[in-house]
Image: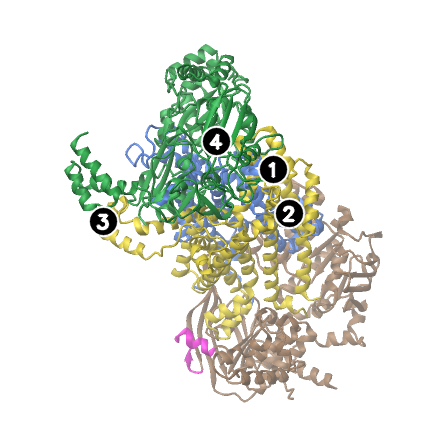
Amino acid sequence: MTSFEPIAAIQRLRRSRATRAKTALKKAPFSAWFGIVVIVGYVFVAVLAHWIAPYGETQVFSEAFAPWSQEFKLGTDQLGRDMLTRLIYGARNTIAIAVATTLLSFAVGVSLGLLAALHRGWLDQILSRAVDVLMSIPSLIFALVLLSIFGSSITSLIVIIALLDSTRVFRLSRAVGLNVAVMEYVEVARLRGEGARWIIAKEILPNVMPPLVAEFGLRFCFVFLTIAALSFLGVGIQPPTADWGSMVRENATLITYGDVTPLLPAGAIALLTVSVNFVVDWFLHATSGLRDEK
Amino acid sequence: MSESEYKLGIARSLIGGGNVSRRDFIHLGLAAGLTVAAADKLFVSTARAEPMQGGFAKLGMAHGATTDSIDPAGYPDTFTQTAFSGSLSNSLTEVDAKGNVQPDLAESFESSDGAKNWAFKLRKAATFHNGKTVTADDVVTSLQYHMGKDTKSAAKSLLESVAEIKADGPETVVFTLKSGNADFPYIMSDYHLVIMPAKDGKADWASGVRTGAFVIENFQPGVSAKLKRNPNYFKNGKPYLDEVEFIAITDLAARMAALSTGEVDYIGRADLKTLGMLKRNPKVEIVEVTGYGHYTLPMNVTMAPFDNPDVRMALKWAINRQEIVDKIFLGHATVANDNPIAPAIKFAKDPQPQHSFDPEKAKHYLKKAGMENLKVDLSVADAAFAGAVDAASLIRETAAQCGIDVNVVREAEDAYWDNVWLKKPWCASYWSGRATADWMFTQAFAADSSWNESFWKNPHFNELLVQARAETDEVKRAAMYAEMQQLTHDDGGSIVLVFNNFVSAQSKKLAHGEVAPNWENDGLKMAERWWIATA
Amino acid sequence: MKNSGPGPREKGKDLLQIRNLHVEGFSDERWHPIVRGIDLTLKRGEVLGLIGESGAGKSTIGLAAMGYAKPGCRITQGSILFDGIDLLAVSETVRRRLRGSRIAYVAQSAAASFNPAHRLLEQTVETAVAHGIASREEANRSAVDLYRRLQLPDPETIGFRYPHQVSGGQLQRAMTAMAMACRPDLIVFDEPTTALDVTTQVEVLASIRNIVEEFNTAAIYVTHDLAVVAQMAHRIMVLRDGLTVEEAETRQMLAAPAQEYTKTLWAVRKLAKPEVAAEEYLLTIDHVTAAYARTVKVLQDVCIKVPRERTVAVVGESGSGKSTLARVVTGLLPSLSGSISFAGQPLSKSLKMRPKEVLRRIQMIYQTPDNALNPRQTVEDIIARPLEFYLGFSGAQRDRRIGELMHMVEMSEAYLDRLPAELSGGQKQRVCIARALAADPDLIICDEITSALDQIVQEEILKLLMRLQKDFGMSYLFITHDIATVRAIADEIVVMHQGKVVEQGMKSEVLTPPHPAYTERLLSSVPEMDPDWLTTLLARRKI
Amino acid sequence: MNPVARTVLERLGLGLITLFIVSIIIFSAIAMLPGDFAKATLGQSATSETVAAFQREIGIDRPPVERYFVWVAQMLHGDFGSSFASRTGYRRSVAEIIAPRLYNTMFLAAVTALVAVPLALGLGILAALYRNGWFDRLVNAVTLTTISFPEFFVAYMLAYLVISRDTFIGSDFAQSLPHWLAASLGWALNAVPKFPTLSNVNEQTPFWDHVWKVALPAITLTLVIVAHMMRMTRAAIINMLASPYIDMARLKGMSPMVIVLRHALPNAWAPIVTVVAFNLAYLIVGVVVVEVVFVYPGIGQLMVDAVKSRDVPVVQACALIFAATYILLNLIADIISIATNPRLLHPR
């Protein structure tokens, strides 16, 4: 079946990316809008945490587990810290850590994955086997061991989770990279004599962005869950830094009695995860050009 | 005795005899001036006060690991301690609910030569589970298991003071100590020092054959241990239960849930946060005793800035202990005063003044020390004690108000005792407490103790310690201990924050007498001492 | 077996009537018209050829005849009356029952249109069984019969093979069998032979024609190839941009097209460049043998010389090794043995060993510009890179040169900001040419660069290439399967078959008989405009 | 050679190398951890003498390289060695420690898989069939939400459901609700089966009892893994729906259901089984959190315990089992991918 060319397109000049984004946004479904609004809200809160939060991050008040009131909108936590304040600072810390972790894991995973896809041969073999080895070790327990070795500072937390996560990013980027690396325009670049760095950065990367961005969104969310699971196993973020994963863990026992406190940070994580996924779904749908019926 | 008390007395004795109905009892209670509800409650608790035979109890323990074993060289946590020391085995002595030492496998004990020589006479009726009589040789080999160069026992240091143990005939064991110790029988109650049968001159721990109230039936390390009643137990009538199962439930929420759903009848270390909510469950009851255990923040006094007593004093005044009790332990603890001797222990005397949160005093001492911009690291992990990290967070806040910058360093929980304790200048620590002042001081404050966690070497304190140990005049002894407690309070390197309470929760199905405070789970002996009230 | 041409046949009554059909397609967040009011009538047993360039809407009309619009398309207006049933008015269930049983479809790429997971036989009988037209046994028997009639090898067992296990030509015939399985009244053939080699195409065309005649099935035959449609259709309808240009009986249409557009379509075939003998050789391929997995030799002992300022056309069918030849010359596939010299210097076998200057002097242009242009780079990025990379151009110098290059390939500078997706096929190929020119090369390897293009566009591109050669004097190594293209552009011809050079020489020598057997077969299989060509050819081959 | 046999041999060979490297990594990681078994066991009551005696007895006073090779030699004889928790005259072989735990883990994984995999496939297929409809959106939103909560949180919520079955009516929360709502919620909660919140099984637990006891962990894990598999199933099928042969099937008059099941699904197996294998591997290697919450004696908790106590032989054995599981499941996924792809199974 031949593809049709829009008749009107020939005369039209290229529209800027901004206008494209605008038209795309206009057509975004409700779920995507919802996701975008929530994410923007979170970022807003995270960036302005210092100004929005009613109290200091670690400020302690006399009453622990205070009920919701005018003074403490969401009550206080086990140490008498304002819950709302902790949640707001939690947004800042958690999102910052998750962003840093995901960026690092993508920097490592994508560059190595695309390099493997481009070069194939022994480099690909070595990297792929190394990734196989890493993936065959249970990541949560391995992270636990590594954190015990290197100490659970925020830096090592970020680096370790990022490295263990990067194996998956490697696999994905290698897989999508392979599809692009066989394209003729990559061959053209190789025939021209371009170096690997240029080919990866200019020829391959721009063409594998959609699946990578989608994966970025998902991995970003999983960082929260990983931190929560690690803090469940006793290694996590240094107190008194507020982060949602640890906050869920600290208050988890209250769930058994139907107390809503642990729902707040867990809900914060869940809302963000769902929102990111909505946006990712829409993004994938919009960029894949995959048209199905209806 | 008032009339109402008299009537209640009658009622109680009637129930004890089993010949009074609930309705009759409530009538008598009403006559004695009680409300219906109160009388009913009294009926239930009184009825439950009389031990009954039979039944199966499932006990949820807060610990348990796959490396657990029945080897008494170990017993690292409440699972092994309660199941294998308290239920399966006996030591020579035990500590009762009042804190007094009582004979257990020994029938009696006496000292001579300024408490330097001790003779323990064994019970005649005592037999091992395999029917063999307990002899003095068994005792000697059992204790020697924890002594000597090659022992791996955690109790080794306990017996450091013992120069010689020998059997004097089949029923008497004689101890010769390196120096006099009036409290020696207390040491013999330690949960490691259980008596095992001797086999080829060595203590045979692996067979699981002991003297205790229960016989081991099935043990899956880290999961559960099932024990059944020892019909030939030397204590008359005990134990009451036919069978007990200890279940390792390390997760707090899981433990609480298991009790709520009735899947276990008892849980150790209940969750303080949700205790209030658990109390609303009509089938559940909370048991709380103030133990000997205490949480400390030892400062290494050989290192700057803690080598300066004024810095230590400033920190002692910079901590809001009441807040820690209220928030970390939710009131289920007692404020301590930098003195490790729990109020329930003999010779305990609260030193003055009570250290509390006082920024002015803290600043005063800081100024005196010339360190107005003090910055210190506090190394903590919840491995030290549950809530250590939170407590450190609170300390950081209060210290900040005194001009002290406390940097809380969260250490890895693994290997905390190996890497942090006795290594970092200021960290968190836990002592389960000792039954006597001497024992406590000797292990944690004596200059030559390897567990002197603050490396505190006060010459006067150490002199007093040796003198008091051998002193048999109770009054003089009391004075010496009071002075020592004042010294740790004023000069010592350990900040003793709080004494902890043992908070457990149980189904009302279970009943018991007064609960011993020396260890958790009724002095580890709950299986032997408790019974099922309503079948 | 009858081998008569598609002469006037006895026509039945009207089977299909399409009136005022409008179809729209969705792209760039907008609905665009694809078909803009088409009327069409087809009688029982009649074959109608739909012809036009890409974008003319011919496939869309073919599908609309089945009451179907591709995902992303919609029928907005009109009526489609099939045997009295208004396909647009009835429910999807009714349409579904008609599809496959009374109206069948044969797709362009059989390889892609057969489900790789099922055996041929299962797929052949699927509709008949699912619609309850025949029992499985009957359907199987009938399928074997059809395989036999369509001259498939081993008709009894071929049905048990999977699609990937049979050749393209066989698949196309199996697909025809699948369409025939329910003895439909109408079959839509959508470019059924476009993806095939010419020699295979002849056989498939013959099979299709026979079976359609045998069952007196009406057909809509969609193609862009005039010579093919001339063999197959009774009547031809020329389409452009979703509108009918003209419609007539085949012979009449071929003899006297009425419309200007139709005439230009007809004219394409006449381009031919006079050959010029070689003076000096630029590239010498000497006894080169190459293989992919070290086992299967794709090139065997190939010797080719490319003269300066001349075009050497390498002709062959798929699998002949002609594209591999390009890869060996560019260094992408190091040869196993033999040597290549370029401008008198030996050429390193591997790409990595070649200096930048050598890389610059050999450029390559690919068959599908869609794959050869990075969809995320603008035209300017694409053309600028060789200038920066090889020549170190920047700033105004670079911009000026880009302007010149755009001018050379006859494109407006307004296109510089566009992404490839916003260009037409011909424009994309021009950008590829501009990119190659930017390096100022001595040799350009053109790998089937026109075969994905419409014929009118092909002609323009070929003309452009010839002009550029005249102006700048580069050599072309022109790889193609299309004899018409060879006629148009080559000075010398190399015929390849199964990795070996069958024949080479000046164009005139190679194209004039006598030929070696393979060349003969290849040349004779190229369809001609004569409606009797197929009949004659088959008759001749039978001898 | 038969492509399946070749893949199996190749992968098993690579798998052995992987296992070897994993064992080195794990061994070194544990060696780098602060402390050792003796110190970890003795904890606060350690003295240098007792630690030294302990180290001598279990042989960790030897240099790590030597210990590693001793361990390798043992492994080559098929002996997993003894746990450090062994004492003279009281051997606790690693195999004996692991066997019941492994069985439990496999049991839970099997029960979960039996529920989760068909559920995920079914939902995925239905979502693909009714794509972009309300059913699709609903399933998507629900599954997304379940994976958005930390695992232990889901577990506790389920436990809460079971607990509040009995306690809800009397709770403050219920009192704060309007009466009718509280009553109907209470009624709904009553329909919740009284699943045990404690999954403490042992070797004597009868089969059906075991199934009953793992109900909550299995449900938790199902909620955790279904989303991933379901989304992949849906995506893989929809991806296939863009193929020309799907167009062909439509033009052959096939119904949407037939198209999805007969034409799209058989070609979508490869990505689906890959993701299913990934999740099954997770069921075996990644469930430590759920094991802790429901006190289920599985191998994850065993490994965490062993890491904490530095019981190297047990850690090594667990790591190898996990790695082998991962390798085998991936191998099986590859075999299924080959078996469902005639191009690979029947080469030309």
Residue B124 percent coordinates (x, y): 46, 37
- Give the SS element for disc 4: strand
Residue type of the residue flagged with mark 3: Pro
The lab-note entry on whether marks 4 and 2 share a chain reads no
- Give the SS element for disc 3: loop
What residue span does the magenta drawing correspond to? C83-98
Please give the residue where the numbered disc 1 appears in the rendered image: B201
The lab-note entry on whether marks 3 and 1 share a chain reads no
Could you give the CA–CA distance between mark 3 and mark 1, rounded to whole angstroms?
A: 74 Å
| Mark 4, other Cα within 10 Å: few <14 / some 14–19 / many ≥20 | many
Could you give the CA–CA distance between mark 4 and mark 3, rounded to whole angstroms?
A: 70 Å
Residue C339 percent coordinates (x, y): 84, 57
Chain colored blue = A
Please give the residue where the numbered disc 4 appears in the rendered image: B121
Say which chain tag 2 marks: D
Could you give the CA–CA distance between mark 2 and mark 1, rounded to whole angstroms?
A: 29 Å
Residue type of the residue flagged with mark 1: Gly
Could you give the CA–CA distance between mark 4 and mark 2, rounded to whole angstroms?
A: 44 Å
Give the vertical position of C318 relative to C84 (above or below).
above
Residue D268 percent coordinates (x, y): 54, 63
- Give the SS element for disc 2: loop
Please give the residue where the numbered disc 2 appears in the rendered image: D81
Which mark's residue is nearer the viewer, 3 or 2? 2
